[in-house]
Image (cartoon, helix red, strand yellow):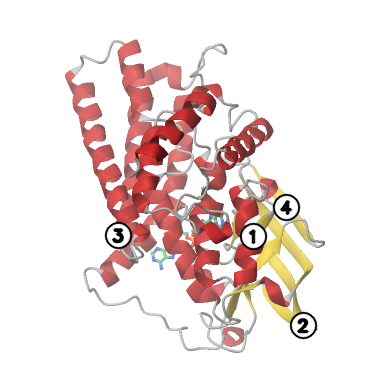
């Protein structure tokens, strides 16, 4: 049944597949990388291979999860530009499919699949990360719409995005989890200012986003007014699923570290071999676990706490591989020949790796989720759970 589809995928990658090292560097030339990513997605769309499991009514192919597996197998070894599109395809799209109105799905999903619109996630704030429900960006009713004022932070790719899913407080008079609403925000709307932040790696992939009297219409509400926490929880679960499968942007692959060990004459060193073997086994475990999570999601089951385990495991392997690379590379990791194509990669990987423990909810928060939901340990005390938001003591 999947044979014809496999042939189409193979033909696409034979014609358009690009080796990851042949595409513009995300780090050194972000504008060219984003342009190449959009071109690639448009080519996929043109070949009738975008949105494999999404309903045909919204531009997808309406096919089963087994077709997605076939696609992934044929895509192996080619650049997928996943990190630019993961927030749209892996997080915003599924939320719109589950909670959006018919009009929102028809309006937003086809341009997302064509890469005409890149999406971002406007959740975290300077005063609300792990405790997301305490966010203070306010959406105040105005006519039949809303006026939004506040600040978001760590908004990945906001500077390349056309739209975002925004979480804002619509009712400060009820406890914090109940007064939130999710909106679709047009990133070009008057009042939105996006300011890139420089990371430890030197890149500027995430941003501060300032919202000053930004007007949103009644059609921009996703789900119920006051139902933002449910929508956010769904989006965060999808984020953990995405991060279990693809630790976004982790640049140091195990294959690259094996090649590095060979180049440095360390491939026969028993200690290096053992550690490479351990990393390989851990990587295989992560891959198999990611497949199990993906299978649950694709048949409509909630992956629940599985996704927290997947996210923890994927981040751990990424850190393990980055650290091993640094050790094998030795002085080359801190001072490199400008002509070396791998120059700076090992240092970059080591500086990047810790972010994977934070993105999508920190490791401490994932362990709390597992402790409470899987091990049945007592819940964390939440003294503010039933207190109206406006009565909470907050800094700032
Ligand atoms: C690479 C990357 C990309 C990101 N992209 C986005 C994005 O696109 N959109 C977006 O909205 N956000 C994004 N984020 C933000 C991310 O979701 C938050 O950084 C994360 O949820 C943690 O929040 P915080 O940074 O405010 O840390 P805090 O919540 O202030 O936590 C600080 C420390 O305290 C610990 N801590 C806090 N509460 C508890 C607790 N109850 N129990 C135990 N320990 C606790 C944390 O584990 C952490 O170690 C991104 C982050 C990263 C690193």
Horizontal and vertical percent position of residue 285: 24, 43
Label 4 vs 3, first from the N-terminus: 4
Residue identifier under label 4? 194
Label 1 secondary element: helix
Q: Which mark is residue 108?
A: 1
Label 2 vs 1, first from the N-terminus: 1
Q: How many numbered marks are there?
A: 4
Q: Which mark is residue 306?
A: 3
Residue 199: which quarter of the image? Answer: top right
Quarter occupied by the N terminus: top left
**Disc 2 from disc 4: Cα separation:** 27 Å
Residue identifier under label 2? 144
Q: Nearer the viewer, mark 4 or mark 3?
A: 3
Q: Is residue 14 left or right of residue 166?
A: left
**Disc 4 from disc 1: Cα separation:** 21 Å
Quarter occupied by the C terminus: bottom right
Q: Is residue 222 left or right of residue 274?
A: right
Structural crowding at the residue carrying mark 1, measured as other residues with C-alpha within 10 Å and reported as few (<14), some (14–19) or many (≥20): some
Give the residue displayed 57% in from the left and 84% down from the top.
389
Label 3 secondary element: helix
**Disc 3 from disc 1: Cα separation:** 29 Å
Q: Nearer the viewer, residue 129 or 306?
A: 306
């Amino acid at each position: 049944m999947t044979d014809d589809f496999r042939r189409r995928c193979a033909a696409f990658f034979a014609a358009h597949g690009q080796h990851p090292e042949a595409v513009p560097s995300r780090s050194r030339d972000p504008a060219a990388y984003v342009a190449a990513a959009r071109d690639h997605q448009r080519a996929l769309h043109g070949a009738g291979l975008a949105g494999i499991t999404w309903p045909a009514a919204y531009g997808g192919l309406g096919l089963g999860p087994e077709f997605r597996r076939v696609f992934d197998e044929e895509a192996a070894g080619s650049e997928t530009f996943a990190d630019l599109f993961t927030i749209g395809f892996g997080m915003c799209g599924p939320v719109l499919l589950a909670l959006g109105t018919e009009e929102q799905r028809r309006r937003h999903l086809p341009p997302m699949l064509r890469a005409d619109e890149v999406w971002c996630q406007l959740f975290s704030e300077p005063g609300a990360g792990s405790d997301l429900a305490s966010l203070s960006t306010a959406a105040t009713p105005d006519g039949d719409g809303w006026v939004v004022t506040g600040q978001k932070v760590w908004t990945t790719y906001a500077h390349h995005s056309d739209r975002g899913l925004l979480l804002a407080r619509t009712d400060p008079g009820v406890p914090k989890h109940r007064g939130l609403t999710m909106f679709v925000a047009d990133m070009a709307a008057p009042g939105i200012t996006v300011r890139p932040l420089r990371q430890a790696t030197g890149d500027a992939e995430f941003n501060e986003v300032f919202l000053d009297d930004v007007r949103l219409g009644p059609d921009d509400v996703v789900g119920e007014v006051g139902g933002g926490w449910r929508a956010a929880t769904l989006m965060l679960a999808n984020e953990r699923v995405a991060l279990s499968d693809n630790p976004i942007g982790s640049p140091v692959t195990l294959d690259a570290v094996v090649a590095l060990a060979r180049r440095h004459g360390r491939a026969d060193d028993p200690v290096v071999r053992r550690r490479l073997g351990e990393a390989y086994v851990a990587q295989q475990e992560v891959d198999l676990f990611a497949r199990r999570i993906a299978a649950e999601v694709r048949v409509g089951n909630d992956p629940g706490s599985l996704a927290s385990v997947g996210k923890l495991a994927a981040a751990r392997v990424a850190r393990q591989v980055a650290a091993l690379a640094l050790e094998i590379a030795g002085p080359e990791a801190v001072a490199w020949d400008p002509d070396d194509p791998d120059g700076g990669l090992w240092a970059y990987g080591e500086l990047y790796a810790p972010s994977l423990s934070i993105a999508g909810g920190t490791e401490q928060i994932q362990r709390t989720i597992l402790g409470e939901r899987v091990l049945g340990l007592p819940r964390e005390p939440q003294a503010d759970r039933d207190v109206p938001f406006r009565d909470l003591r907050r800094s700032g």
